[in-house]
Amino acid sequence: MTARERVEQYLSDLYDQPVSPLLDEAMTYSLLAGGKRIRPVLLFSTLDLFNVSTDKGLKTAAAIEMIHTYSLIHDDLPAMDDDDYRRGKLTNHKVFGEAVAILAGDGLLTDSFNQISQDDHLTAEQRIRLIAVISGAAGSRGMVGGQMLDMTSEDKQLTLDDLKTVHRHKTGDLIRACFECAGIIADQPDAVIRQLVKIGENFGLIFQIKDDILDVEGSFEKMGKSAGSDVSKDKSTYVSLLGLTGAKEAMQEMVAETEEMIHELSGGDASLLELLSYITSREN
Amino acid sequence: MTARERVEQYLSDLYDQPVSPLLDEAMTYSLLAGGKRIRPVLLFSTLDLFNVSTDKGLKTAAAIEMIHTYSLIHDDLPAMDDDDYRRGKLTNHKVFGEAVAILAGDGLLTDSFNQISQDDHLTAEQRIRLIAVISGAAGSRGMVGGQMLDMTSEDKQLTLDDLKTVHRHKTGDLIRACFECAGIIADQPDAVIRQLVKIGENFGLIFQIKDDILDVEGSFEKMGKSAGSDVSKDKSTYVSLLGLTGAKEAMQEMVAETEEMIHELSGGDASLLELLSYITSREN
């Protein structure tokens, strides 16, 4: 089984003995809605740099994916982005209703920390550091703060620096956390963890620039959601600020820098390099 | 400063250096909306049984209050209970709008675990146990599960056992967690923590029965929200199942049992006893 399949398996077995069967059904619906599992794969690939097995990262990877999934459920709500489709399937609230979708998100978020707190592959010290990193990356100083910034900057003309701040928090922090968590799980010294943080920050930015490019170039069939939604909302993006060619150049520059950092840590033969190439060439 | 004032102070200083000032404003609005701080006070009173200072419990108490506050913000949303007032003030979404209210709840919930993870008054082992207890009590196997059960049982005639299950999770688990967390912070042996869990479960039930009684007997001026809202929704409550007198008797019986358990642990001179009497005589 690949690492990605192991996460898929783990998440599909996660919820039994429900308090509310409907809640579990709604959480599981979105958890297993065919996500790319990019965050878990980033974490495992980083563990791989240090020859640490998937076992030690499985619950942390699952927890991060639970947080990512909750954020999608809440983002899709009518009061937020009001999206009917996600990954080609109906969004959570379209299937279960708004109230259930809100609670499914709340449940996934809360349960994610419970997962890590009970991970007996790791010491208490490691688990606490992981929770500190992930809750920091996901909370009001991270993803939620970024989501709010993004909302309040709609219809505003952003500078490139503003845009970077929005994305650093909205999507970057949780991606960066995958790298930082892998360093903690692999018991790496602080200097290495700092390097991983930088690599993770770059991955987050590359990911977002690619998203902005796909929003212009993508199609519904490939992406499972409507392309061009940023343009129709008149949002500032890397493409609107730098142009399509400029955005692609900025991405390639950052890819080159990141490849060099990975080489320094790994000596050159790393699955992270393949991932980087996958992220920049993906079509959805 | 009383313990309650210390929590109030702590929560009012919590949010500076925002990523999004609006998000911090919304979170702080509800955090400081004049809650009774019953959960923090329960935790501190339990610590007091073991002569442990407020310092050691401050962040945990704040975290639990943050979780309680998030749950109120989300419960009040139009898709959920659709309440305009809470504690005599406009609800979060009435002031900030739905999208901000959803994110404010998400932020408070996530940040609560960050608080505990960074509490250097406690060992890593203690912090992990606290997070395991609180996330278990608040997540899909606890409060969120209970909230969903409550929603799906509206318009249904519940048995007393069904009703107890709903309340054990919806309101009971987080109250019970206050007692259990105090035992962990005070480094008590498992046998004592098990006793605390029982006392906490009783407090939760007593609290809920009293709430149901107040819903019939209370008034808007005293409660800061509309009385009779359960009756108008045709909900099963302790009062609808046992009658007003029966509910009061059931509460008194449970109070007597709980007093005895507290006596056993404390020798008789405990602020928890005063609290028990406060909870059963409160008018809002």
Image: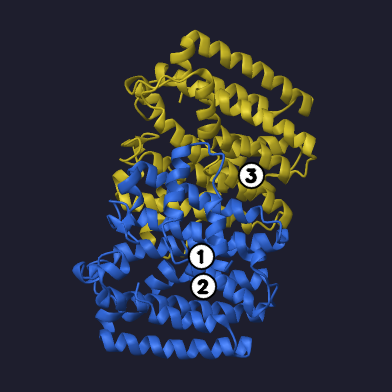
Chain colours: A blue, B yellow
Q: Amino acid at mark 1?
A: Ala
Report the residue marked by disc 3.
B133
Residue sitting at x 56%, y 73%: A179
Looking at the picture, does residue A199 appear above or below residue B224?
below
Provide the chain ID for the residue under circle 2: A
Marks 3 and 1 sit apart, C-alpha to C-alpha, by: 22 Å
Q: Element type at marker 1? A: helix
Confirm whether circles 1 and 2 share one chain: yes
Provide the chain ID for the residue under circle 3: B
Numbered badge on residue A137:
1
Looking at the picture, does residue A263 appear above or below residue B124?
below
Which residue is outermost to the front?
A: A1
Badge 1 density bin: few <14, some 14–19, many ≥20, Cα 10 Å? many
Confirm whether circles 3 and 1 share one chain: no
Provide the chain ID for the residue under circle 1: A
Marks 1 and 2 sit apart, C-alpha to C-alpha, by: 8 Å
* Rendering quarter of residue B215: top left
Looking at the picture, does residue B167 appear above or below residue A239?
above
Report the residue marked by disc 2.
A176
* Rendering quarter of residue B273: top right
